[in-house]
Image (cartoon, grey):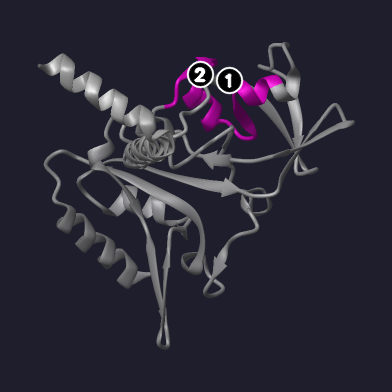
Amino acid sequence: MIINNIQFSLRHLGRQKINTFIHVFGLTLGICACLLIALFIRHELSFDSYQPEAKQTYRINSVWKESEKQFDLYATPIVLAQALRNEVSGLKYVSQVLPQFNSVIEINGDRHFKQEHVLIADPEFLDIFNVDIITGNGRDALTKPYQAILSEETALKLFGSDNPVGKTFRYRNEFDITVAGLMRDLPSNTSLPATILLSYVDDEKFLNNGDTWYFGDFSWTKLQASTFVVLEESTSLNNVEAQLNSIADKA
């Protein structure tokens, strides 16, 4: 009985080839569209979920009010990170990064590259974010001035198959940077794509990324760093926010 029904259906569909094609094509297109949307949503929701302490990690944002305008910004003052370490309890790690824009790298004086996703980072960056160091000591590299950790793809682009560790490159036509380590390419679902990690140096020209928000002439109103914290397991987020507001009131 079932076989007869199937044979009847196939003969019926065969007699109306155009109509059958339209229905099958539409069904296939709809299924493919749903699968693509599902994969896209899954990818978007997976951002930074692979980080070791993702649930306890927070980025601090700035809210600046001027007259009737309110600015909600991802950037924070550079001085905030040290203030958090000194004055806020319940924090496991504190780190700040400075995304760099319009980064030009010079190799041997004759080869120039425009490099995207360059980050200036402090050593604590490696405590918060899952960076797989292949060669070198990551913390040492980010502790010493004018050092760099390159991704595998970037190392191949700049130095070919040569071992880049110990080599130097010219950064923004001003700073000589020594390659101190290699890291694996970061996955696509990271909110901080980095091809090069540069060590933090207290040099205004070096830190200037061309995208600083100025709300005054003193350090607390120059917003140019992204600040991240990891809370201790027992720490209340409301308690940390209250301490942050206390710092903001004093600033």
Classify 10 Å Cα crowding around label 1: few (below 14), some (14-19), many (20 and above).
many
Q: Is residue 167 left or right of residue 190?
A: right
Q: Residue at x 32, y 39 (%)?
A: 38
Q: Check residue 95 for magenta coloring.
A: no
Residue corresponding to mark 1: 181
Q: Position of residue 86 (x, y in %)?
A: 32, 50
Q: Which amino acid, by three-letter code, is at mark 1?
A: Gly
Identified at 27% across, 66% down, the residue is 245
Q: How many marks?
A: 2
Residue 82 horizontal/vertical position (percent): 40, 50
Q: Quadrant of residue 149?
A: top right
For this orientation, the residue located farthest to the bottom is 67
The residue closer to the viewer here, 220 or 119, is 119
CA neighbours of label 2 inside 10 A, class few (<14), some (14 to 19), many (20+): few
Residue for point 33% across, 47% down: 85
Tell whether label 2 touches label 1 (CB within 8 Å): yes
Amino acid type for the residue under numbered disc 2: Asn
| Measured Cα–Cα span from mark 1 to mark 2 | 7 Å
Above-or-below relation of 180 to 97: above
Q: Quadrant of the N terminus?
A: top left
Q: Position of residue 161 (x, y in %)?
A: 72, 11
Q: Nearer the viewer, residue 62 or 222?
A: 62
Look at the image and tell me in which quarter the C terminus lies: bottom left
Q: Is residue 19 visible?
A: yes
- Badge number at residue 137: 2
Label 2 residue SS: loop
Numbered tag placed on residue 190 in the rendering = none
Eye-nearest disc, 1 or 2? 1
Q: Position of residue 155 (x, y in %)?
A: 66, 22
Secondary structure beneath dot 1 equals: strand
What stretch of residues is rendered in magenta? 131-156
142 in the magenta segment: yes
